[in-house]
Amino acid sequence: MNASTFANDATGAHSLLVSAAHQKRERIPVSQTHYDQNPPAPARQPSNGLGTTGFVLGLVGLVLSPIPFIGVVAWPLVVLGIIFSAIGFARTRSGRATNKGLSIAGLVLSVVGLGVCLVWVFIVNAAVEEVEEEANREVTITYEVTGDAPAVDVDYTTYGDAVSSAQETGVPLPWSKEVRTEGLVKGGSLLVTTGEQGGSATCRVLVDGREAQTATASGPFAMADCSGF
């Protein structure tokens, strides 16, 4: 075998090896990885902001509702608390929100706060009616003076919607005077003074027939004071 024949054989063998390698490479599957450029958005977590808001409004409204005058602020708070809590509860029923218990608690607090506000309305209305009734009520005041003094000086004042005063001097006993008055605040005073001849004098005040005040004085220029009724 000469050198030329050996070279040709080597070249042919090399070509066969290269061809076999290419065929093997073609038979090996190439794995392909696909990357999704738009991944799915994460699931939205349910929340209950309306229920929480209703709970806070109901709690604040319930705390403020028993306080006189300031409790007026509780009215819109408890009403809004009922609305927000009810909406929050409805959202929990449909699965769009969580914290069902917080919505129920807000609804209960708001309803209780509204009940306290209504109680205050009844109390205030009753108080206003009582004041109006007292202001329009007429009373009869009777001033009386008795005793053994020969003569006395009498000063009496009656007040109500208006104030009236009168003075009588040197009046013999017994003496009496009847007046009528009305108003939110009603009352009067009676002052009796004996003369230089002395003696005793007793003043007495009746309001609608019931004794309201009495006092006795004796001696010259003594004073019996029936006031503060």
Image: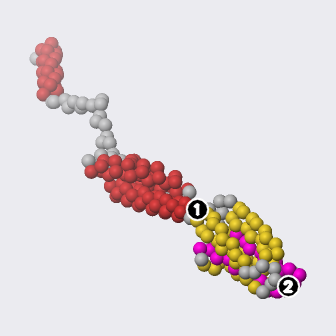
Residue 29 position by quadrant: top left
Up the image or down, 58 lies above or below 159; here it is above
Residue in the picture at 30% in, 29% down: 37
Residue 81 spot, x, y in % from top left: 41, 52
The quarter of the displayed image where residue 185 is located: bottom right
Q: Considering the numbered disc 1 on the image, is that residue within a helix, a strand or a loop? A: helix
What amino acid type is highlighted by mark number 2?
Gly
Q: Earlier in the sequence, mark 1 or mark 2?
A: 1
In this rendered view, identify the residue nearer to me: 184 or 71. 184
The residue depicted at 69 percent of the width and 64 percent of the height is: 159
Q: Quadrant of the N terminus?
A: top left
Residue 196 as seen in the image, left or right of residue 80: right
Could you tell me if residue 98 is visible in this image? Answer: no
Label 1 Cα neighbours within 10 Å, binned few <14 / some 14-19 / many ≥20: some
- 54 or 167: nearer the viewer: 167
Q: Residue at x 70, y 67 (%)?
A: 158
State whether residue 58 is above or below residue 216: above
Q: Is residue 125 above or below residue 83?
A: below
Q: How is the image coloured?
A: secondary structure
Q: Secondary structure at mark 2?
A: loop
Magenta residues, as a range?
Answer: 188-208
Image quarter (top left, top right, bottom left or bottom right) of the C terminus: bottom right
Task: Report whether 11 appears left or right of 99.
Answer: left
Q: Name the one closer to the observer, 100 or 125.
A: 125
* 199 in the magenta segment: yes
Residue 73 seen in this snapshot: yes
| Closer to the eye: label 1 or 2 | 2
What residue does disc 2 label? 198
Mark on residue 135? Answer: 1
The percent position of residue 90, horizontal first and vertical second, equals 30, 49
Could you tell me which residue is drawn at 56 percent across and 61 percent down?
136
